[in-house]
Image (cartoon, rainbow, N blue to C red):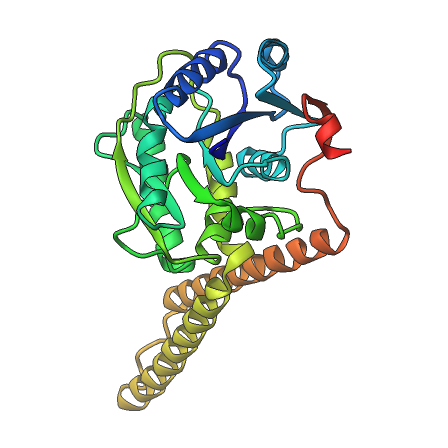
């Protein structure tokens, strides 16, 4: 028997697509010699019939395992739930909408065979909407500046990792998991392979503007203190500007005593500094709030039901 590959797929509003993804995946594995596989489908409390489809797939194929979360925890929490049930030597994560081609998983696996610890799929032409593409660019900037991601490395939701990387990732037990940050702090031996990115045929993306902002905030507040350092630098710069402006005002008054002091400029300075103070306090509050939530052991996810995995866990 060859090495075992565990495919982890978070599922949300994918009742019409997940069956096709699984069928494509199982068909692709027949062309990859020397590997066995299992598929772990994590239902992130989808409001449609997604879990019913997962149940049917599990009944038809014992290689497929289902996990049903009690409420919607988000894509990264769903991934963490799936990671804790994997048995494979290699773990591959992909989307449930068919845009990440399951039949090209062999390219990711070949990247691991070449010596990498983690291989991310890179798309030459993304078929997301402009909104998602814009969000991806902001996420790229955030991970590079805040998390130290190499500039040439492209990160995506379609990736393969060795077992030791996943074991290190699941050691993180606090709330607000961010898988990219966990991977980046585990290893630097990460590469890219180019795969096709398909157009979405059914439905729309589950990421709204609010969810994308929450994901970005989660990324840098959970794994970096750089925002606090940036806040300190901005605060020092504003203080320096205020000191310089005060000297300028005193000199101007001595040179021409008849010139009235500018009320509008004073109010502008007060509003600017006040706004910056509120922004920095909000940032500090975000960090403190997350510490409070973690200290209260808020769960990453809650598993309501499992399919084809209960005996394994016992």
Furthest-bottom residue in this view? 254
Give the camera-side residue of 125 and 191.
191
Horizontal side, residue 120 vs residue 8: left or right: left
Viewer-proximal residue among 162 and 247: 162
In the rendering, at what x and y percent does residue 132 appear? 36, 31
Q: Which residue is located at x 43 percent, y 67 percent?
A: 230
250 shown above or below 229: below
Residue 61 x, y percent position in the rendering: 57, 13
Q: Residue at x 63, y 52 (%)?
A: 171
Q: Is residue 85 left or right of residue 263?
A: right
Residue placed most toward the observer, 238 or 165: 165
- What residue sits 21% from the left and 34% below the top? 124
The quadrant in which residue 291 appears is bottom right
Asked whether 112 or 279 is in front, the reply is 112
Q: Position of residue 165 (x, y in %)?
A: 50, 50
**In the displayed structure, would residue 214 be above or below residue 127?**
below
Left or right of residue 123: residue 50: right
Look at the image and tell me whether residue 207 can be seen: no
| Image position of 218 with respect to 8: above or below | below
Horizontal side of 307 relative to 222 (left or right) equals right
């Amino acid at each position: 028997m060859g090495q075992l590959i565990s495919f982890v797929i978070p599922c949300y509003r994918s009742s019409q697509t997940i069956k096709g993804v699984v069928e494509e995946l199982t068909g692709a594995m027949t062309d990859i010699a020397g590997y066995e596989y299992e598929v772990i489908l994590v239902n992130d409390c989808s409001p449609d019939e997604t879990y019913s489809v997962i149940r049917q797939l599990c009944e038809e194929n014992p290689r497929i395992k289902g996990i049903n979360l009690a409420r919607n925890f988000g894509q990264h929490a769903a991934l963490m739930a799936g990671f804790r049930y994997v048995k494979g030597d290699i773990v591959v994560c992909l989307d449930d909408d068919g845009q990440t081609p399951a039949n090209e998983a062999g390219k990711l696996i070949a990247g691991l065979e070449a010596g990498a610890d983690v291989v991310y799929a890179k798309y030459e032409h993304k078929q997301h909407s402009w909104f998602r593409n814009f969000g991806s660019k902001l996420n790229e900037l955030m991970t590079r500046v805040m998390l130290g991601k190499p500039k040439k490395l492209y990160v995506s939701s379609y990736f393969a990792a060795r077992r030791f990387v996943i074991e290190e990732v699941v050691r993180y037990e606090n709330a607000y998991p961010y898988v990219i940050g966990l991977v980046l702090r585990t290893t630097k031996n990460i590469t890219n392979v180019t795969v096709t990115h398909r157009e979405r045929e059914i439905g729309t993306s589950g990421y709204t503007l609010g969810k994308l902002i929450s994901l970005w905030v989660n990324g840098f507040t959970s794994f970096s203190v750089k925002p606090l350092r940036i806040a300190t630098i901005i605060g020092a710069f504003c203080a320096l500007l205020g000191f310089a402006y005060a000297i300028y005002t005193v000199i101007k008054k001595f040179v021409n005593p008849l010139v009235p002091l500018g009320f509008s400029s004073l109010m502008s300075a007060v509003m600017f500094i006040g706004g910056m103070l509120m922004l920095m306090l909000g940032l500090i509050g975000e960090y403190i709030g997350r510490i409070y939530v973690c200290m209260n052991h808020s769960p990453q996810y809650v598993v309501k039901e499992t399919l084809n995995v209960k005996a394994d866990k016992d």
